[in-house]
Image (cartoon, rainbow, N blue to C red):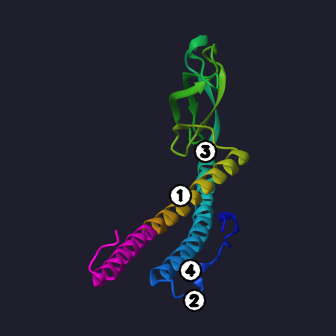
Amino acid sequence: MAASECPRVRLWRWRRSPLRRRSDLVEAWVVLCAWVFALVGALFAGLVAADAVTRSAQDMRAQSQRVTAVLVKDTEDPGASRVTTDHLVWGTVRWTDPDGTTRTDEARVPPNAEAGSKVEVWTDRNGAVVNEPLSETEILLHSIAGGVLAAGAAGGVVLGCSWMVRLGLERRRMEQWAAEWERMDTPWGRKTG
């Protein structure tokens, strides 16, 4: 009989058969539980991670405020070899907080800006210069990416653990088969292998 003509028996571990061992049924339950836990765990981890990223970004946005600062000294053009992706350079700026405190700090400003020019910077509630908060679109993209990564990691951990359990079951099954072959060989007084 050719290999292509052999019928494929699906879900054989769940069917009653004299050839089915207890370890086959345990392995079937392990696989089923692993897939259920992997799917549910991945969904839960993804939702929790996406919510955490969104909440964190929105908290940072709520704590940040835009202030108008004055450039303390001229900035230089960094040259073509040192241009950054945002085309900004570091410069010293000074501003006054709403409570009247004058602050000075380093901030990213346009190149070739002259001292005394006004620039917009973002500060936290302590008055320290911070990066511009994420936009709504950036928050959405970050939360999706965080959710997908967390879901993949959670599902991978569960499926990896089930794979390790299945390897242990396979090792045990091979040991049982070896012991049964030993019992079958010894009554006849000769070895088959």
Q: Which residue is mark 1?
A: 153
The kind of residue on which mark 4 rests is: Arg
Distance between mark 1 and mark 3 Cα atoms: 32 Å
Which of the 4 image quadrants contains residue 91? top right
Element type at mark 2: loop
The x and y percentages for residue 96 are 58, 34
Residues under numbered marks 4 and 1 in contact, where contact means CB atoms less than 8 Å apart: no
Q: Which residue is mark 4?
A: 13
Nearer the N terminus, badge 1 or badge 3?
Answer: 3
Q: Quadrant of residue 155?
A: bottom right
> Residue at (50%, 29%) from the top-left corner?
105
One can see residue 78 in this view: no
Residue placed under numbered mark 2 in the picture: 16
Indicate which disc residue 64 carries. Answer: 3
Residue type at mark 1: give it. Ala
Q: Between residues 82 and 44, which one lies in front from this camera angle? A: 44
Give the mark nearer the N terminus: 4 vs 1.
4
Q: Nearer the viewer, mark 2 or mark 3?
A: 2
Q: Measured from the top left, where is residue 14 in percent x and y?
A: 59, 83
